[in-house]
Each structure stands twice: as structure tokens, then as C-alpha cells.
Image: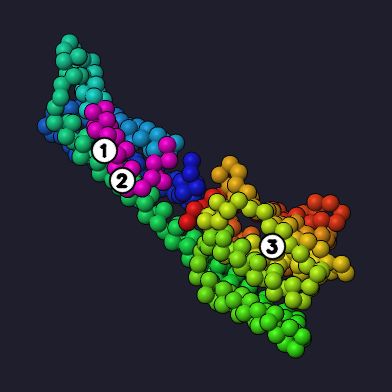
Amino acid sequence: MNKLEKIVNNKSISLYWKCQIIGWGFVSLLWLYIALVRDQFSVFHALANYVLDVTICIGLTHTYRTIALKAKWNSLNIKKLIRKVIPSILILSVLFMLLMNLKMSGYVYLVDNNNIFLENLLVWNPVLITGLRHMSIWLLAYHLYHFYVREITASKTNAQLSVVAKQAQLDHLSAKLNPHFLFNSLNSIKALIIENPKIARRAVDLLSDLLRSSLYDKDEAFITIKKEIGLVKDYIELEKVRFEERLNMSITMDNALGEYMVPPFSIQLLVENAIKHGIDKRINGGTIILSIIEKDGYIIIVVQNPGHIVDNGLETGIGIGNLTKRLQLQYNGEASFNLNNETQDQVTATLIIPIHKK
């Protein structure tokens, strides 16, 4: 059962059965009237016939629903769904006709003692047209309802994702614009203006690029790994102005992965966290190791840095929590993030996301 069906069932499984019983009960009233008035059935036989009509219709449509759920037809696009629905309508209509014929043949055989049981059973009669009409209406209503629920669910998820993503960008921008960050960066640049004007100009460019990315990439749900790595390199280069030889970085990645998509600032956030809670707290600094690989349909991003997590990782702040929330919304629970102490002096952050190509 897919997630959509779970959402629907949690709230309205009783609605499904109400619709089935009331809907087919109402439709079968016409056949009850025909049995009483035209066919001159007794009241008992007419009511028994009515119950069988409702049972047959519910049985056929509920069987279809069970098959559709197991095959996840509700998640198909329109073209693929039509290819499933049209043959299903034909099959259900033929089954409807055969069951109705079986019911009537049984009635004629048992009540009227008529021995032409098989002849009545195999007659292709107007009941087939009735079956085509009713099964078409039921399948159309069923799939339209699920399409509506799916669209509403997607709209709500997209709205939540938009809010969280924008908030993440605002948090990111706020972190870059906080006085501590600007003070350190500008102080480093100030010292370089006299000592090394060329590097000072480069530092200003890097700071400008970082702020520009924070401003103009905020509306993107995904960016390429190549672009994200470029952002990481700019950030490291700018931080090296402050840390100098205390900060080093190693990046291992197959170039073919560069066009795969990741949430913006996801890798940069892990690197920033490694500097803030690892490198910055060590006198001798250290090396940040970033590796990106593809495995079993997933992209595995690993960031390692010297240091040790304390207080169950609470020191990582709201940035990591925000990233986790974005992953949950963007990948529907298929992505994961872990932060742990690999050794006594090494922290490993592992981000696993499904492959999403440009």
C-alpha cells in the first residue's frame, strides 16, 4: 500500500465503504423496481435479488481496488493509468454480465425448474452495456478521487517545502551575515590589503560570491553537485584567509557525479559545521575530508573532520536540524543523515540521498 493510500485510509476508509454500500445500493434500486414491476418477482425474491446485485457490484469493484492498490496504479501518470483502466473496464463488464446471468439462471433453474441453465448463462445481452456504463463510472470516480487527493497532498508538501527551504536559506544568510563571521572575514581582508592586495581582492570576491549565492539560489529546490562543490571551494578559500595553514581540505569525487542534484547548501553546511565545531577549536587545525560516491541508486556524501561531538551532537545548532527537515520533505523519508564520532578524534557526517539527475 503506497503512502497516498495510507493517508487516505487513515482518515476515510469508512467513507470508502459508505460510498460503496450507498452508491451500489442506490443504483440497484432500479433493478429492484424492475424485478417487482416488470418481472413480477415476489417481494422476498426481489429483495434477495437486490442483495445479490449489490454484493456482485461491490465484490467486482472491491477486487479491482485491491489489485490497483497492490500494483500501485494510483501513482501512475495519466497515460499509463488509461492503459490499465480501459482493459479493466472491459474485463469487469464481462464479469458483471456473467455473474448477473449466473444469478438469473440460478433463479430460473431453482424457482421455475427451467433446465436451460447454461444457455442463459452464456447469453450476451444488454446487461453487458449496463456493466460497461456502471464500471466506467465507478473506475472514473475512484481514480479521480485519488488523483484529487494526490494533488492536494503534493500541493501541501510543496507549500511546506517552499517555506522550509526559504527559511533554510534565510538561516544560512543570517549565519553568513552575523557579526562574528563578517568581523573575522573583514579583519582578515583588512590585514591583507597592505600585505597582499591581490589576495585581499580575491577574498572580497569570494565573500561577494558567497553572499550572492545565499541571495539568488534561495528559490532553487536542487542544484548540481558540481555547483555545490564550487560553493564549498569558495567557502574554504575564504576561510583559509583566516585559518591559513590550519585549514586544509581533500575532495574525492568521480566527475560523472557532478551533474547529479542535491539540495542547495547541503554539502556546504556540513563543511561549515566541520570548521565551526572541529577545526576552529583545535590549535593545530586539521584537514576536512569530503568524499562523494554513487551506490545502489543513492548518492553518499561523507564529511570527516578532527574533533569530538559532545552533548549528543546538540552543538551542531539549528543548521543540521533544518537540513534534516528539508531532507524529510524533499525525499519523502528516502534520504538520511547521520553525525557521529568515528573515533575519539574524528567526526563523520554522512548524507545519503536518492539519485536525482539534472
Location of residue 48 with respect to 211 vertically, above or below:
above
Label 2, residues with CA under 10 Å away: few <14, some 14-19, many ≥20:
few
Residue 25 visible in rendering? no
Q: Amino acid at mark 1?
A: Ile
- x and y, in percent, of residue 196 in the image: 73, 83
**Residue 194, quarter of the rendered image:** bottom right
Q: Amino acid at mark 3?
A: Leu
**Residue 227, quarter of the rendered image:** bottom right
> Is residue 276 found inside the magenta-colored segment of the image?
no
Q: Earlier in the sequence, mark 3 or mark 2?
A: 2
**Residue 215, quarter of the rendered image:** bottom right
Side of 315 where 39 appears, left or right: left
Q: Which residue is mark 2?
A: 79
Q: Which residues are magenta?
A: 71-96
Q: Earlier in the sequence, mark 2 or mark 1?
A: 2
Q: Identify the secondary structure beneath mark 1.
A: helix
Side of 266 where 343 appears, left or right: right
Label 3, residues with CA under 10 Å away: few <14, some 14-19, many ≥20:
many
Q: Residue visible at 69% across and 71% down?
A: 237
Nearer the camera: disc 3 or disc 1: 3
Q: Which residue is mark 3?
A: 270
- x and y, in percent, of residue 217 in the image: 53, 71
Q: Amino acid at mark 2?
A: Lys
Instruction: Report the front residue among 181 and 152.
Output: 181
Nearer the camera: disc 3 or disc 2: 3
Label 1, residues with CA under 10 Å away: few <14, some 14-19, many ≥20:
few
